[in-house]
Amino acid sequence: MALAETAFAGGFGMDVDLRKVPQSGLARNDFILISESQSRFVVTIDPKKKESLEKLLRDVVYGEIGVVTEGEIFRVIGLQKKTIIEANIFELKEAWQKPLRF
């Protein structure tokens, strides 16, 4: 959800690959997608600043799991190399907000 919320806020799409998520023993896409493991967070950064961030994280386990895209598509590739989510970010945002309206 954090990735989708980031896409909503920025108005950009994302391409995410679950095979790149640092994890141990999770063999299901849904477990990785909704994992609430401690000490996990999402960072989006300008590619020009990637090297600086990597230097800061040199002693920390991290993974570059995707990229922000110019379009409006939020895409997730699952553990079996198949697309498991592919949707417009504005449609996803509407589906996320709709139940909260009274």
Image (spheres, rainbow, N blue to C red):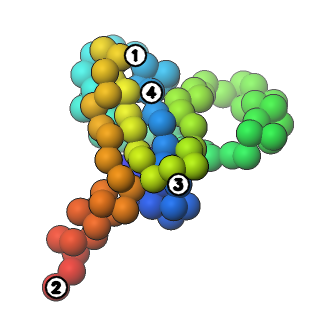
Distance, label 2 to label 1, CA atoms, is 41 Å
Can you give x and y, in whole percent of width and height, for residue 47 in the image? 74, 39
Tell me the SS state at disc 1: loop
Which corner quadrant holds the C terminus?
Answer: bottom left
Q: Secondary structure at mark 3?
A: loop
Q: Nearer the viewer, residue 5 or 27?
A: 5
Query: Cα distance, mark 2 to mark 4?
Result: 35 Å
- Of the residues under marks 3 and 4, which one precedes in the sequence? 3
Res 12 label: 3
Say which of marks 3 and 1 sits in front.
3
> Which one is earlier in the sequence, the residue at label 1 or at label 4?
4
Give residue 6's position: percent from left, percent from top: 50, 55
Say few, some or many: other residues with alpha carbon within 10 Å of mark 1 (under 14 / 14 to 19 / 20 or more): few
- Which residue corresponds to the image point at 37% horizontal and 27% vertical from the top-left? 77
User: Secondary structure beneath disc 4?
Assistant: strand
- Of circles 2 and 4, which is in front? 4
Which residue is tagged 1?
A: 24
Q: Which mark is residue 102?
A: 2
In the rendered structure, are the residues bearing label 3 and label 2 in contact, judged by CB atoms less than 8 Å apart? no
Between residue 62 and residue 45, name the one nearer to us: 45
**Which circle's residue, 2 or 4, is located before the other in the chain?**
4
What residue does disc 4 label? 17
Q: Report x, y in % for residue 7.
A: 48, 54
Q: In the image, is residue 57 above or below residue 88? A: above
Circle 4: residue type: Asp
Figure quadrant of residue 31: top left
Q: Which mark is residue 14?
A: none
Asked whether the residues under the numbered discs 3 and 1 touch, taking CB atoms below 8 Å apart as contact, a structural biologist would say no
